[in-house]
Amino acid sequence: MQREKSVKAKEVIESLCKVLYSLGLECVPSAETFRRAKFNKGEDVVLEFWKLLHSVLLKALLLECSCTTLSDLDSHVREALWQCGYGASWIVVNTAGLRPRSEVGSRELLVAFGWVLSSGSLLEALLRARSLELDILSLPPTVSLSSPREGGSLGDVDGQGGLKEDRLLRRLQWQYGKLRFQWRRLLSIREERARLLHQVLSSSTMPSTSTSQPSSDDHHSMCSTALKKEVERLQTLSQLLEAYLEWKRQEPLFWCWMDSVVDSQLSDLREEDTVENMSPVHQVVNRCFPYGYKDKEGLEQLDNMLLRLQTGLKDTYTRQSRKAQSVLQDVEELEEIERRVALRLHGLAESCTSTPTSGCCSYRPSLQGPQPLPNHHQSWRSGSVLPQACDGAVLPGKVSGTGTVMVQVQASSLIVELQQREGFLLGELGQMRQAKRGQIQEKTASWLEGAGVVLIPPLPLKR
Amino acid sequence: MSIVTVQLGQCGNQVGQELFEVISNDANDTQRKVYSECSSERFFNETANRELVARSVLIDMEPKVISQSIAKTAKSGKWRYGDRSHFSQKQGSGNNWANGYCVHGPRHEEVVMDIVRREVEHCDCLAGIMAMMSVAGGTGSGVGTYVTQCLRDEYPNSFILNHLTWPYGTGEVIVQNYNSVLTLSHLYQLSDAILVHENDTVHKICAQLMNIKHISFRDVNKVIAHQLGSVLQPALTGDSHGVYNRNPIGELMSSLVCHPEYKLLSVCNIPQVSSSSMAYSMFTWPGLLKHLRQMLIANSKMEEGIDWQVRAPSLQPEGIERTRSHRRPGFNTSLANLLILRGKDVNNAEISGFQHPSLYTPWLPADEAFSMWKTPVPFNKYEKSAILVSNSQTLLRPLDNMVGKAWNMFASRAYIHQYTKFGISEEDFLDSFTSLEQVISSYSQL
Amino acid sequence: MTQSVVVQVGQCGNQVGCRFWDLALREHSHVNKKGIYDEALSSFFRNVDSRRSVGGSCDITGGRIQSLKARAVLVDMEEGVVNKILQGPLRELFDSTQLITDVSGSGNNWAVGHWTYGSAYREQIVDQLRRAAEHCDCLQCFFLIHSMGGGTGSGLGTCVLKLLEEEFPEVCRIVTSVYPSAEDDVVTSPYNSVLAMRELTEHADCVLPVENQSLVDIVNKIKHMSHSGKPGSVIKKDSAIISGQGGVSGAEKPFDAMNNIVANLLLNITSSARFEGSLNMDLNEIAMNLVPFPRLHYLVPSLTPLYTLADVNIPTRRLDQMFTDAFSKDHQLIRADPKHSLYLACALMVRGNVQVSDLRRNIERLKPMLPFVSWNQEGWKTGLCSVPPVGHSHSLLALANNTCVKPTFMELRDRFTKLYRKKAHMHHYLHVDGMEQGCFMEALSSLSSLIEEYSQLDATKDRLMPDAARLNIAT
């Protein structure tokens, strides 16, 4: 059983390596290296992972760096990880100073790699870039024309005399010229495609004639090398896509394996000391938003993270629930908490995106809760006389109470109330987060044995 | 996509040779495989035994320069010209545009166009044709104009860029202003864009920035080739999804010369230092771009001696027209600019200084008028470099001078007999003058 | 690569030509050490395998030098000079078919040379010219060398010029004319010169006037300097300017020093067409740049270094001095002062290790001192040839289209009218077939109108000429 698992893990890691390699990363370690990294073994493994992290981050962040020495590499990787929000202790300077490179184990690097891989859609982004590189023929030439109306003052010529007309004319001439150039660019691409197609066609329909005619001199060979190049490109592309497909099929297994890595990392940490006895999750959260709680962006990210946490948890939970019927009550309670959190967060996010000036309609739902929203909108639309009626006197019984009341509330008082609520919610959120983390840790520790699921919160990469 | 270069006359052949030298060195220097592959696809043909053959056609009416160029490249061994892609005659055009345009051009049209056609057919996809020549002499200007005309007929939908070297204000060829007027007026109808290098400014760059004591034509040509190469080497356009621009000439034109009355482009770059002082120089993006912006608005082609007093005019509130009186003295109004950044940390460069509407003509919004390319790959040993291709009033004054001098000469009918001898009449001259006065007027009203 | 043919007519023409071939051989042998028949050599020499039959030439460049033949046609109506050449060390250069001689001479009579011999030898001359042209791959230029004072040079020489125009209208004709001194021992030289002037004005592309008196002055000055024995003022032994030492011919002859100067002028004018350089100047560019109006094609030559001193001056100063000298009075090959007359255009043909920056610096330096015509304030044409003349590091030939030729022409006219008023020696001319009284009048009025054209330009010299009103664009 154990052996079979490790075989499968090896397979999935190999498929990952294949994808990475096809994506054009320069230093991809072998599956064996991954395995050894899990057990924190070997100096060479450490180096390979430094290089891997370096090349991944280089591509992911579109950085430019020509580091060659290991020390350069080291600081560069640390910076890049910091930049995208990874918060393990070894990348930051703490009271004891920066941890020297030699003390960073390969497992820590592996965890970091796993984190980078899981954050956002790294592979997908790289895949997109790479396929654009390879598939030059289907790359659409970009046509960007701002419409002349955008120019503001030029658009509205209200008979201010010839000067403006002249400008408008010049502008139009410019746009016309631009269109003409765009058309030529498109044409040249079409021609290229047609030429290649023609070559494919002629070489596939008349394979015998082309070989029997050596007279078709260097020009022909030139064309066929271009064709060959194109075919090579397409082959690489299809290989890449296949590798990615294979990886996608097996991806869950990899994360299982990764979990085991994190587990062993965690257990090591616990053994080591208590000062740094924070789970990576905790650290990430702290690192990621040192100042961001008041930001909308931060909130959204947090929200996002929590939602993913919830769904992940739910998955595990439903799976586990079959085995553990006895803890059903707890689960219901948890779900109740989740629902509440979700509702509140949703509301919070909504209220943050809207500005007070944009009208009362947009923030009303946050005070009402989500249910009455569609109803309300319908009634607003269907009875077009309603707002007028509301102006004069309230028609009790006909309109749903809360809705009407809110219409008449002053915007400023609303903002105050919202801010209060925001503060309250934030506090509550913090508490809940803390409580929930405890719960999660307890439950995962108690329910899941061995190769169970530990959740690493995925965070989007900052681009 | 590939660019076919047509080198014409002594100047065109010498500058062209230096250009390919710069490009092949630059592509060799870098470890970026994609970059160097893209660059070589653009300028070179790779033969079966991995030799790089320049996608270039060499044309001159006398043999010395071409054989020199071919011998020089053969010696370097990094790349070479095609075995059959050059054409030379025995006798030059004698500084006479009419001789080149009316006699040599038509006489050799068929052979020359055959060579060009062959070179174009070697490209999988033709991005455009660049004709390189001077405007002073007879072959570059006269035959060059004729060949451009043939290219336009043969490839009506291709991008044609003319790279022109303007002569020193004095001392090269006495009839240079006539030749220039005839060349420019014809090319303005034929070419899509005209990229100009002035010998005088480049000479100054050699003297003041590169500290060359005895400046030779080779030094001047090298600077021109450096600037030209930095424009044409691969770069990422704004919307390219991380893929190098495939059609540099087409993209250059769609961002700079969409209006048919404004086709004159100039280039300036920063930094430009002697190779000895390069090791001691440190450059930051803010510093470079600040200088480059001032070079643009104060109309200075060099970072040395920039007039820092010149400021962009404050934008008039809507409804009030900007008139001549509102203009700042010495301020260089742009129609469109293309900024190209190459080297380390390009993504951190702050370029908003070039996007301000006050820099541009009122009829074109700044977002339309400004575009940028960038690449993290450093160019030609410069860790960072910024290049500005500008369609602006920069060339207004030299053009006005050139037309003025030629007109003065024309008023006393000096040298006209040399041109009528080959079939260029006084009316032809008048037409040319008229069309250039139109260009001058267009640019001065920007 | 293009080729040129030298046509040397008359005693003076042949003597100068002889020096030219001597020095040209010397220059090429200095540059071309391997004995390969190269492009540069081909411009003035044919490579003939003498073992094969006549015409069995091996003109393809790149092979070994077999036997060099000058691309030249030698014409004289007496035998003396040509015979001397044929007995001298240069005899190998010429075939007997390249020579046209007579025995009786023209008797210092332009009409005899131009009309009598002109019609008698017309076929033969045209034949020779055609044959020389056929040996050329791409014939670019004819160089005609003759004197103005005598009968054959001026009379038959200008007749040859007309033939060249008829037969080879496409080929550029550059004439080197040696003008007689005022104290010329030939009484009829004013007649001959003015009659020849008309032909030159009408049929030549460029004329390089050289005055005997200037050459005499230069040679005297050099001799004086070398004999004065001042320390540091010794003439370089290997300088090719006036000394023929190191050439093929042996002892110096009386006029050799003077003829060497003219020969050097020809060497320098063709250097850029023969050798490579960073700024080529082809022969057809000379007329294109320097002749704004068809008749005003008299280009005053000046050569530097002329008085080469083997002293230790700072190199750049010497280089700049060379440019300054080219505009000084005592370096002109006619007695004239271009600095105080009006320049229509000026060409600088530089040889040796000189860069464009040196050229620019000197033009900027000299420009303020030199008056240029209003519409051609920047009338400079430059050429850079990388091969210096033998024995020098660099040299400069300046060609000025300058109104300073006017005094020379006016002096000529005065001497002509002095004779003409007395009708002296008229009958010698008038009994020649084809010669009429009218010819004199026409020649005189041609010269007068030429002088008038120069005067009109001269009149604009110190006036501030306004720029021509530019075309207006209706907006």
Image (cartoon, rainbow, N blue to C red):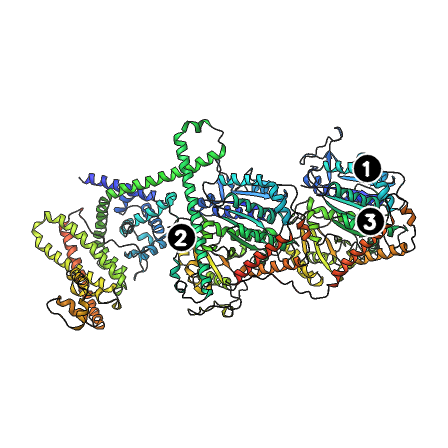
Quarter of the picture holding the N terminus of chain B: top left
**Residue that mark 3 sits on:** C196
Q: Nearer the viewer, mark 2 or mark 3?
A: 3
Query: SS of the residue at dot 3?
Result: helix
Where residue C104 sits in the image (x, y, percent)? 90, 40
Q: Is residue B246 visible?
A: no
Where residue C179 sits in the image (x, y, percent)? 83, 51
How packed mark 3 is, by other alpha carbons closer than 10 Å (few <14, some 14-19, many 20 or more), is many
Disc 2 and disc 1: Cα gap in Å?
79 Å
User: Do marks 2 and 3 share a subunit?
Assistant: no
Query: SS of the residue at dot 1?
Result: strand
**Residue that mark 1 sits on:** C99
- Which amino acid, mark 3? Ala
Relative height, residue B298 to residue A59 (above, below): below
Where residue B99 sits in the image (x, y, percent)? 64, 47
**Residue that mark 2 sits on:** A65
Disc 1 and disc 3: Cα gap in Å?
23 Å
Chain containing the residue with disc 3: C
Residue at 16% x, 55% y is: A440
Chain containing the residue with disc 1: C
